[in-house]
Amino acid sequence: MGDYKLFDKTAEFGNGFIIAFVHQSQLLYFVLFLPKMLQQSYLLFGILAVGILSQINLFILSKSMSYMDSKQGYNGFAKLFGHRNLRIIAFAGIAVILIKLCFIVLGYAEIVHQFIFPSMQPSWLFLFIMLICTYIASQGMEKTLRFGIIAFFCTFWMILLYIPYFVPPGADVLDLYPLIPAGRDEHPWKGMLMIWSSLSGPEYIILALPWINPKQKALTYLSIANGISVFLYIVLFMACLFFFGTPYLGKISYPVLNMIRYLQTPVFERIEIVMISMQMFQYVFLASFLLLSLYGAIRISACSVHKETGRKGLYGVSFFVLVCLFLIDQFFGRQGKELNGWTNLQLWSGTLTYLLIPSLLLVANIRRRRRSSH
Amino acid sequence: MFWNKRIQKIRHEKKNGNELFQKNEDLSLESLKAMISNMDDGESIEHSISRNRKITIVYIKTLIDLERLNESIIQPVKNCSEEMIHTCLSSEKIVAVTTLDNAQKLMMQGHVLIYDDKGHLWAVPLENPLARSVEESQSETILYGPKDSFTEQIDQNITLLRRRLPLTELKTEKFSAGYLTKTKVVMLYVEGIANPDIVDIARKKISKINFDMIIEQSNLAAFMEDHIHSVFPQFQQTDRPDQCAYSLGLGKIVILVANTPFALIAPITFFHLFQSPEDYIHRWIVASFLRSLRYVSYMVSILLIPLYVALTTHHYHIIPLQILFVLLESRSKLPFSPFWEGLLMLFVLEIIKEASLRMPNKTSTTLGTIAGIVIGQAAVEAGFVSKILIVLVGVAAVASFLVPNYLLSKTNTLIQFAYLILASFLGIPGIVLGLIHMLAHLNGLTSLKQPYFSPIAPLYWRDWMDFFFRAPIPWMKKRPKQADALFKWRYNRGDG
Amino acid sequence: MRSPIFTVLLIGCICFLTGFSPFSDQNTVEEIAPVTFLAVKQGEEKGSLTVATLVPPIMNEEKQFFSTKVRLLEQGRRQFNFKYYREIRFGQLRMLFIDEQIAKTGIVNLMDTLLTDPEVSPRLFLIVFKGDFEAYTKNQMQKQKDLDYYLYRMFKHYEKENQGEIAVTNIHEFMEKTHTPYSDPYMPVFNVDKNCFSYEGTGFFSNGKLKGQTDKEQDQFFLLLSKSKFLKNVIIEPLDLSLGEVHAIVKKQVNLKDHTVVLKIQYRGRIDEYRGSKDLNSQADFYELTDEIKDYLEEGTVSLLKTFQELGVDPLEIGRQTLTPVSKSMSAEDWLTFWKSAKIKVDCSIELEPLTI
């Protein structure tokens, strides 16, 4: 068992994994009911605007990443913040990562429960998803990140499914009008916040810093991924507007899935079942990445970074997550609509991490540079 | 723990095994004769030669060329008047032997031992080349292309490769593996193209082998693979010299094992198992089509039956109405649930497949007919299985034959069983769970420490030229990144 | 190292093989009877329903007609299950026949019930029927075993190939149009009695309630203006004429200032059959006939639109023309009051392909 390492780097990575990772992390559970939250067609510009903001944020992120020495990994961060501070940050990180992880798994299980197996206990799905996540995570960070590319290829083609919605007579440009808001809307900020939170996720790439080749132009790949995500959001939102129309859209809880239910092919009449199942690739990938991150964060805050990583620790962490999932499912449950307090928690935590991490990192790096130059 | 104890025990035995065959006696006529005692084919002949000297010739008659024995050894020695007998022999490869251990080794490799009365021992190579001629490959036949294939003679195999790559950079490193079989293993690579790190990994892995018998290439591969628990082969096995030469040129390593006509190629990816030499013979569009057909049919062969089970147990609403009616009709009176039905059919099919492999050619046709009737008609008429499943099983079975790699296609049924359980348990999400597991597993594999799922993860765009599609050969200007060759351009840049 | 994985697998296999499953129900095909249609009728008491269907879907078994009086749709399914040895499932529900009486009282509730069931596909054809559906099915299933299937194929044909002839609509379109302010849904109306099942025209809904329907003549105009904008045949009885392969290009304009709605329609087609007195080889007669056809089409379209105004429905989505990228949109009520009193101008032009024999 001596050569079992979770966080080592053996082979060179292609460029693909940054795109895959960032893109996948930006298309989470939110994508499925985001159109409902937006509803008004002028928020198409909202998506675009937030996309540009997110681009700026990614610029900051890549800038601060370029200051870091990617080979150092943990020690790099330790130098930047100091060991004690890093432990505090890691401890806070445990909560954030745990929330995100639980949110992903719960959200996906909820969808499967709603659309595929109404009679099944969602807790069974937690078990299966956590099992497969633990398997992937136990292969180590490097292979988990690589799995992201597979997940990307297995899910990205689904964008083609939305093409029929853009074909007349179903698609009528009149469905998009009015493009400029005429009256005052009740909560446009909430929609925007939602988009921002949906686009959050790339900040977690700093956890994969040692695997990023310093020679790579990370910003290019980050931008490509961000561009793809924004494009996908716009495509989805437009398809939903064409398909449901603004007033009806507000009444549908999972608009994207309900839209897919309408599709038919000669062989499979209900594509949504296949589609939802294939979507599992994405959730499983992110969940296993977060699982590893969680394990790492626990190790840092428990001050056992320099000990050897073992499978037992990872299994322990995933068991802990499983227990959390059961508890959250028991107590928060599914009280009526899909946007309950639990979802709001994730909304805000995602927003804050995406907003703060790149900037904080940049500030810390600049401060350190100044200090070292004096 | 339990495992560790067992491993220690095995190590202990190995040590004994090595000692068992160590000969520590002194070199003498008696010890030589003792060596061949109880060996019917071991012979020792005493000859008196000139100057009243006596020599003893010891050999294993089944290993040497008896016809040449007389003319190249006995006659020259008989007429020899020199002090040192070996000067009379024309063979250049005469070895003076000093230890009994060495004498034994050489004799078993086909040398003739000559012991003179002064206590000198010489070994003259007189190996009987028990070889068949170069024939057409039986396992990978192609229509338009080279027809030669490897034989059991390792030197002949190297010749076949050397003719294709007349380079001094084509290095052949010799190893010996297995303390009983003492199998000759030759590792070939093109120096300057093959990555020295990978060569080094392979070299270490071969020299580390500590086992009694290495009979054929798979035994060797088992010791060299990074993941022994995986069902997927991590080395490509081929008996085609052209394919080996091509791989060598791309910077890969070829390992030849004595007494087997198959070579190992590494590092490979999962997708190499779907490639056939024929791909480079067809027009590129046709080749691309055929290759993608193979991937599709592989997926069909592992997913079709599980999908049937998933749809009939969980997702009846996916099936188009027309098909559903047919399904309902054919399933309405069956005794088994779809899962058991599928399991049964797969099991029977696998039995038939396996049986037809083990049978002599003449009986296997009869077997095919009987099996066809039993599966095709009788099972349906008896009401054991539905007609639709029969069709699907047939399609899946035929599709599995499209995979060029035999070892890979043999894993199909096992994977199918796993998917079948998942499908009946969780329907389509279950199948996807299985797919995730399979892809994650493939993603985790390595072949000589190089990623096994490579052009996809990690993403090597360069290698996509020869992946799902085969691009026109002039477009493939660079060697695949997966083998990590030192010299990436395939055309000669220096000379313009 | 490997033992935990093996243990999990082992436990999983044992669980599975002993029949332990996370589901409370399974959908093994031979144990269920997926019905293809439901016919809903007003019950005798107020608020009650009569639900009817045909089982089993298998062709070579004797068909049975089930009908039961319930208050809720799902209750109907349970009632059927009590009577039948296979479980009745709605996963393959393809057609919903709605009685005219229920359609008049409002069917949005019914649709919501069906849409919330994850098994039911949104591609569920909606049909309004008049008359005794039960008698028809009972009579017909003796002669024609796969009655329900052929009905389904008929609707699918008219939907998929955009054939004109019947304005097929499904549950999603119905709901979308009900919720969208400037459009109103429609459904085909069939007349059913013991021996026949015949198309009668299109029924128009507003707020989920059936308001009225077209007759066969008007229906031609509606089909030409609605989604498919195509008809295989337009029969013009007063002129003893049949037009074939008629395509229409429709331009709608709403002029808020003049309080008018303008429809510019370009028809293209060819004369299929003519039994009138004119000589089609003569140029003058041909032009005259063209003018007559044009007048007829204009009149018909105007009368159709007038009917819509009277019913207070807008199935042609004319109100959407008021939408612009910038300005605030009208409310649905504002539009309706405007529409009811708007002046109508229809401008037809027809292009006849030359007659060839």
Image (tube, grey):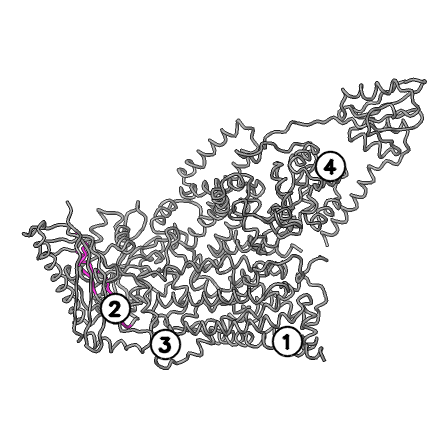
Dots 2, 4 in contact, CB < 8 A: no
Is the magenta region chiefly helix, strand or loop? strand
- Give yes or no for residue A123 being in the magenta stretch: no
Residue at label 4?
A: B183
Of residues B466 and B409, the one nearer the viewer is B466
Q: Chain of mark 1?
A: A
Chain under label 4? B
Q: Amino acid at mark 2?
A: Glu
**Residue B57 appears left or right of A205:** right
Check disc 3 and give the amino acid type.
Answer: Ile
Q: Is residue C114 above or below residue B138?
A: below
Q: Which residue is mark 1?
A: A89
Residue mark closest to the camera, 2 vs 4? 2
Q: Which mark is residue C317?
A: 2
- Count of residue discs: 4
Report which quarter residue B98 is drawn in.
top right
Query: Is the C terminus of chain C in the top left, top right, bottom left or bottom right quadrant?
Result: top left
Cα–Cα span, label 3 and label 1: 43 Å
- Of circles 3 and 1, the one toward us is 3
Q: Residues within 10 Å of mark 2 (few under 14, many from 20)?
A: some
Q: Secondary structure at mark 2?
A: loop
Tag 3 residue = A180
